[in-house]
Amino acid sequence: MEFLWPRFSHRPASSIDGVFLVDSLAFSRGEYGRRNYMQDVLQYILWSTGLCCMAIVVPGAWYQTFSQMASSIPDEYGSSFFVVVLACGNDVYSIARKRARRGVEYIQEIIEQDAVRIADGVGAFLQDLRRRTTGGILLVFGGGSDIWKYHGDFALVYNVYVKLVLDLLRQRTIHEVSVIRGEALRGIETTDRIGHISDVSLRRVAGVYALFARQAYTCVADAEDAAYDVQSISKL
């Protein structure tokens, strides 16, 4: 578990506006190997929005891991910070691969049960997080197969799982919790199937995360990325 803050800030470490909980999306892979880029992104968010955030990073995290990450948020931060949870789909990745091998008829019988179980776990995590802070909470869940370069039946099944889980979570309205897929992530370049970002996309990623920070701060319930925000990010 790694804790990160902006490199340069005039505010004390205990004075933060928001917290990012991030899985493998916190890493890029380029010519010089893998690195955690979140500290640079936090600095960009501070400069571009005025919001001072910290990040807790665990590669390969799923909802139980995110619960442990949330419980590690220092008490000195108080109880009014916003939270952005960046989950690139580990909760559904393995089960979607397993189901995709069994055929469509099998999938139709079991996929909804799987989605309910996953949504129960993620929903319980969000309820716990809601009790930790009164600030807005934004869950960016799953993305899409085109972002992670999934293909074939697996891509189809993965997208179905993500949609079903998101639909179920949105039905369980939790006060000031927004659940989105993360349309603004489309267009970033990844280097593999586990969410490592290409170095050439880091500038765009910083803009996307700043968008997510603003959305969590204002807490627009279940609002996907507005068209004008996506268009502005596409210029980065």
Image: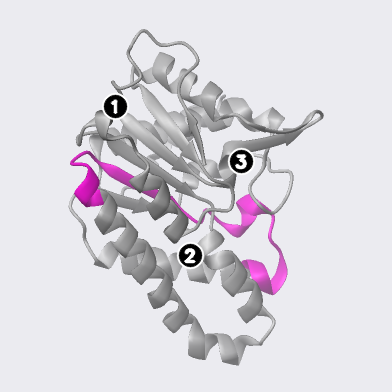
Along the viewing direction, whichever of 84 and 160 lies nearer the viewer: 84
User: Could you say which quadrant of the image residue 9 lies in?
Assistant: top left
Precedes in sequence: disc 3 or disc 1: 1
Precedes in sequence: disc 2 or disc 3: 2
How far apart marks 3 and 1 lie (CA) works out to 28 Å
Q: Which residue is mark 2?
A: 162
As for residue 131 lying within the magenta part, the answer is: yes
Q: Which residue is mark 1?
A: 17
Q: Is residue 21 left or right of residue 203?
A: left
As for residue 119 lying within the magenta part, the answer is: no
Badge 2: few (under 14), some or many (20 or more) residues near its Cα, within 10 Å? many
* Three-letter code for the amino acid on which mark 3 is drawn: Gly
Q: Residue at x 50, y 15 (%)?
A: 7
* Three-letter code for the amino acid on which mark 2 is drawn: Val
Q: Residue at x 30, y 50 (%)?
A: 178
Magenta-tinted stretch: 130-155
* Three-letter code for the amino acid on which mark 1 is drawn: Asp
Q: Is residue 139 visible?
A: yes
Q: Is residue 149 left or right of residue 113?
A: right
The picture places residue 204, in percent across and down from the top left corner, at 57, 29
